[in-house]
Amino acid sequence: MNEKEKIKIFIADNSDETTSEIIEYFENSERFQVVDSCKDGKEALEKLNSTPVDVLVMDVVLAGTDGFVLMENLKNSLGSKAPKIIVTSSLSHEGFINKALTLGASYFMIKPYEMKNLESRIEDVLGLKSASPEKVLQKDYKTMRTKIVEEKISNVFITVGIPAHIKGYQFLREAIKMAIDTPDIINSITKKLYPSIAEKFETSASKVERAIRHAIEVAWNRGKIENINSLFGLKVYNQNEKPTNGEFIALVADKMLMEGLGS
């Protein structure tokens, strides 16, 4: 494959390290060529308007004009001739992902990522694999959402003082994820929620219930009640009143749903 036939990649990233890593990875590739790079969104727009490329790999955070504005301007100036866009960022908030996809990004990759995964995503957006980009995107979005939800739940546990090494930590996290995906399951906590978790972790429903109760007790015994009340934005509990398993699961799940993390 000669230079003209190579897939042309443009990088817009504020990180010299990321840019260098991408350039180095594709340096000796027979299929891909990094044609240019920059840190500034405005500069990227000017270069992309004059130099056609196949794929733009860009971060949301750029000097000058940010990534979202760059995407809007590209859509206005190049229309259907705009390159496929893969957004990469360490900012994994649901709102960033939704906005990037709405503005026309084909993928949103959360940093750090492996270069071979980036190469695979480029192949996907250009239709170089058998799976259609739409199907892969749906799968990728589900993975991203799961990662975001798990990170947020972990942050809640850190705040309230639930240690990661106890068994109830995993059970409680799974229970909250289930309550986010299927809010009504909280009304069948004994008949559906505990048995489902027990089946996944190859244990009994009663052990799941006890482990979750123990995890909540550990948090309350650590005395981080103010953290808990601060987290939920109101005075929910005091040191002497501990929530039931169902109440705590519902409280955290409702918080996530209000932040737009429902399915």
Image: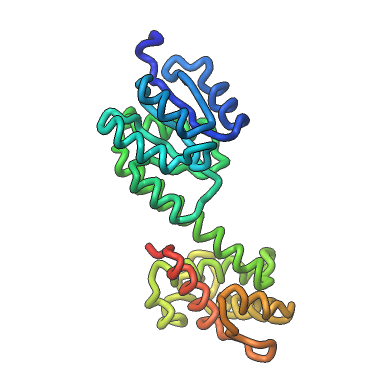
The quarter of the displayed image where residue 87 is located: top left
Residue found at the far left of this picture: 80
Residue drawn at (54%, 74%), measured in percent from left and top? 204
- Residue 82's spot in the image, x, y percent? 32, 30
Coloring applied to the structure: rainbow
Residue at far bottom of view: 240
Q: Is residue 186 above or below residue 26?
A: below
Q: Is residue 142 left or right of residue 236?
A: left
Seen at 42% across and 18% down, the residue is: 31
Name the residue nearer the viewer: 114 or 51.
51
Numbered label tally? 0
Residue nearest the viewer, comparing 73 with 149 = 73
Residue at (43% x, 79% y) in the render: 186
Q: Residue furthest toward the right? A: 222
Quadrant of the frame with the N terminus: top left
Between residue 244 and residue 103, name the one nearer to us: 103
Question: Which part of the image, by quadrant, shows the C terminus?
Answer: bottom left
Above or below 3: residue 230: below
Q: Position of residue 165 (x, y in %)?
A: 69, 64
Spot the residue most to the top: 2
Q: Quadrant of residue 155?
A: bottom right
Question: Residue 188, image x and y in percent?
Answer: 41, 81
